[in-house]
Amino acid sequence: MPERIAEVTTFLAEVLAPRAPLTVIVDGGDHGAAATFAARLAAAFPPSARAWNVDAVLGLTGPSGGVLDSALNVLEPAADRVIVYLRSGSRGGPAGEGERRAQVVIDHQNPEWPVIRHVHPRLADPSQWYLSESRAFFAPKAAGWDQRFGDDLPAYAAAVDVAAPAPGDLALDVGCGTGRALPALATAVGPTGRVIGVDCTPEMLAQARTRSGADLLVADALHLPLPSAQAAVVFAAGLVHHLPDPAAGLAELARVTRPDGRLLLFHPSGRRALATRHGRTLGPDEPLNEDVLSGLLTKTGWNLTRYEDPDDHFLALAVRTA
């Protein structure tokens, strides 16, 4: 078994085994993926847990009368049942609902490199998986990231203009990735200002070092090693929906921002276009939904002043309340 698959299944078995007896339902993925992953997960349970009748049940996906049937359309989570959903780009239709019902969501675009993207907090504290899985998701993509998305640079520069950093400001780019916003931020704050790029994945920051004008910091967006109330502008592209606790992340961004400072949440694709590209459907409870985001921002010390979500970009501007 490839090492990465063993890491994921071993972690899930460690989390789930103490809850036995229970049924684990694996659903989603491309053809045959649920069966393969379910077998590997079942094998990862220790012998003592297997004796407690822990079963990995194959997902019930497939065409039936022109309608895509899914175990997740008829089965709800329960105390003795855990649903694991494999997210892949080829699935459409009920995949969005299935993903919302699942307690565990796994990125399964590459079956040889699965990455855990969500675990319900009742099963495991985010500190047990969030950083390692984020790095596992982004590290293999770092070297080719700018070749795939390099044409987004003008969109990043335009978003920085909306955030309006001024000469002499401290600007943070949290979740900076390969640093596509860093040059525009550095130009805006000028030689008397400072730009800090923060990312949890060292491989991404290695690519960002090819761009000048910023200090780079390996850190978790939920626990920034930065002083409070200092930043004039916080830029965060594609960050919030990768956090296991968006409210905690927005609160941490508020902590490091001075009163009347600005937060710019950005993505070079609109929410619907991005979901379609990833084979998902949007739900009303997603953190970047306007009503949900506005409430989260208000609770964490921000005031939402601008919200845009056409197909070609997502942008939300908020001001730090006193």
Image (cartoon, rainbow, N blue to C red):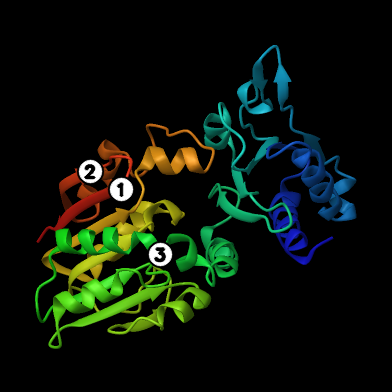
Q: Quadrant for residue 76, please give it.
A: top right
The local secondary structure at tag 3 comes to helix
Q: Within 10 angstroms of label 1, few (less than 14), some, or many (20 or more) residues?
A: some
The local secondary structure at tag 2 comes to strand
- The amino acid type found where label 1 is placed reads His
Count all numbered tags in the image, as a single digit: 3
In primary-sequence order, the first of circles 3 and 2 is 3
- The amino acid type found where label 3 is placed reads Gly
Drawn side of residue 43 relative to residue 144, left or right? right
- Measured as percent of width and height from the top left, residue 39 is found at 84, 45
Q: Within 10 angstroms of label 2, few (less than 14), some, or many (20 or more) residues?
A: some
The residue to which callout 1 is attached is 313
- The amino acid type found where label 2 is placed reads Glu
In primary-sequence order, the first of circles 1 and 2 is 2
Which quadrant is the C terminus positioned in?
bottom left
The residue to which callout 2 is attached is 308
- Measured as percent of width and height from the top left, residue 131 is found at 53, 67
- Gap in angstroms between the C-alphas marked 3 and 2: 22 Å
Which quadrant is the N terminus positioned in?
bottom right
| Rendered residue at 35%/59% (across/down) | 152
Label pair 1/2, CB-CB below 8 angstroms: yes
Q: Quadrant for residue 320, please give it.
A: bottom left
- Residue 22 visible in the snapshot: no
- Residue 182 visible in the snapshot: yes
Front-most of residues 146 and 176: 146
- Measured as percent of width and height from the top left, residue 136 is found at 60, 65
In primary-sequence order, the first of circles 1 and 3 is 3
Drawn side of residue 240 relative to residue 66, left or right? left
The residue to which callout 3 is attached is 150
| Rendered residue at 28%/47% (across/down) | 296
